[in-house]
């Protein structure tokens, strides 16, 4: 289960890239190949030649469009992902309340594959279930529960 979580972080950009490549290949396969004799002629272009040129333009537009869509969707995905700089510092706690031991926080984040949102949720659930405890106690309880459930 834990390997699936870490794998899911990387599959989104890769799937976007693969979708762009596949769409470009499909458009290229659908277009007729240019004939050598039509490329060598210096006469006025015929309707077939114009269609071949238009096909090349469509291919170029499809490739650039799919690459642009992939880049935009990847940027949106990265923007919605929690930043790494905040995951190691602390969890979301109300202002003025004491913070848990940084070593315990790092251990919990390692167990959760650096997912601070899940850590916050688990600590919040523990604080509702066992009110009035110290912050270190909640982090230790979540770590204990995770290790117990994994073994």
Image (cartoon, rainbow, N blue to C red):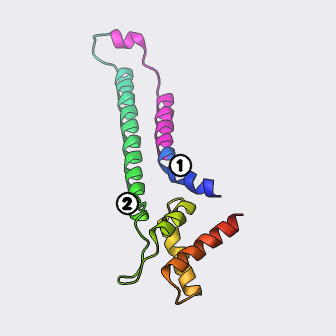
Query: Which comes sooner in the sequence, label 2 or label 1?
Result: 1
Near-viewer residue (119 or 24) = 119
Answer whether labels 2 and 1 touch (C-beta < 8 Å). no
Quarter holding the N terminus?
bottom right
Report the residue that reaches farthest toward the bottom. 132
Residue span colored magenta:
16-40
Quarter holding the C terminus?
bottom right
Report which residue position mark 1 lands on. Answer: 11
Let me know if residue 19 is in the magenta part: yes
**In 3D space, how far apart are the residues under numbered discs 2 and 1 (Cα atoms)?**
22 Å
Within 10 angstroms of label 1, few (less than 14), some, or many (20 or more) residues? few
Q: In x, y percent, where is residue 52?
A: 39, 24
Q: In x, y percent, where is residue 132?
A: 52, 90
Q: Residue at x 50, y 44 (%)?
A: 14
Report the residue that reaches farthest toward the right. 151
Which quadrant holds residue 60? top left
Numbered badge on residue 85: 2
Let me know if residue 144 is in the magenta part: no
Q: Residue at x 41, y 46 (%)?
A: 70
């Amino acid at each position: 289960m834990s390997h699936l979580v870490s794998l899911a972080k990387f599959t989104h950009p890769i799937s976007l890239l693969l979708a762009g490549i596949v769409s470009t290949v499909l458009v290229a396969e659908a277009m007729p190949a240019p004939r050598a004799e039509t490329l060598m002629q210096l006469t006025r272009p015929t309707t077939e030649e114009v269609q071949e040129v238009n096909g090349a333009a469509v291919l170029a537009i499809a490739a650039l469009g799919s690459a642009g869509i992939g880049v935009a969707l990847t940027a949106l995905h990265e923007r919605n992902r929690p930043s790494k700089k905040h995951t190691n510092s602390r969890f979301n706690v109300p202002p003025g309340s004491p913070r848990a031991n940084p070593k315990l926080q790092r251990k919990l984040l390692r167990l959760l594959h650096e997912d601070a949102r899940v850590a916050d949720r688990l600590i919040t659930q523990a604080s509702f279930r066992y009110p009035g405890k110290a912050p270190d106690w909640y982090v230790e309880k979540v770590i204990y529960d995770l290790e117990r459930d994994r073994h």
